[in-house]
Image: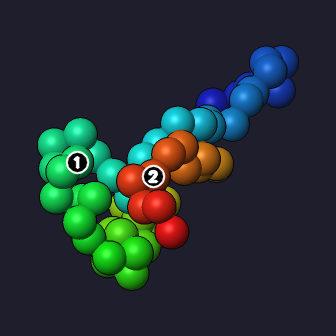
Amino acid sequence: MIDLSEQTVSPRLHTHVHLTMGAANLALQTLQSSEAQALKGLSLAREYMNYPSTTLRNFGSVDPE
C-alpha cells in the first residue's frame, strides 16, 4: 500500500482514443458496416477496461452514419 494522503492524486484519463479506427487498416475500415465498426469499438473499449484508467473519450470515426 502506498500512502498518498499528503499528495494530490489525479485519475488516469485517456482523452484521445480511436475505438472504431486505426491507421494500419484505415482504407479497409471505411468499407466496413456501421455494425462491424461498433463491434470493433466495443471490443477495444473492453480492452481499455483492463488498464488503470477511469475515462475514455472516443475521438474520431470513419463512419459517416
Alpha carbon of mark 2 to alpha carbon of mark 1: how far? 10 Å
Q: Amino acid at mark 2?
A: Ser
The answer to whether the residues at label 2 and label 1 have Cβ atoms under 8 Å apart is no
Residue 11 drawn above or below residue 19: above
Image check: 35 left or right of 53?
Answer: left
Q: Position of residue 65 (x, y in %)?
A: 51, 69
Q: Residue at x 23, y 40 (%)?
A: 23
Q: Position of residue 61 (x, y in %)?
A: 45, 52
Reading the image, the residue beneath label 2 is: 61
Reading the image, the residue beneath label 1 is: 26
Q: Position of residue 19 (x, y in %)?
A: 42, 55
Can residue 56 be seen?
A: yes
Can residue 51 be seen?
A: no
Q: Residue at x 43, y 61 (%)?
A: 63
Q: Amino acid at mark 1?
A: Leu
Q: Tell which of 57 and 34 is nearer to you.
A: 34
Image check: 51 left or right of 32?
Answer: right
Dot 2 falls on a residue whose secondary structure is loop
Residue 49 drawn above or below residue 26: below
Q: Tell which of 61 and 48 is nearer to you.
A: 61
Q: Could you tell which of marks 2 and 1 lies nearer the N-terminus?
A: 1
Residue 42 drawn above or below residue 18: below
Q: On the rendered image, what quadrant is the N terminus found in? A: top right
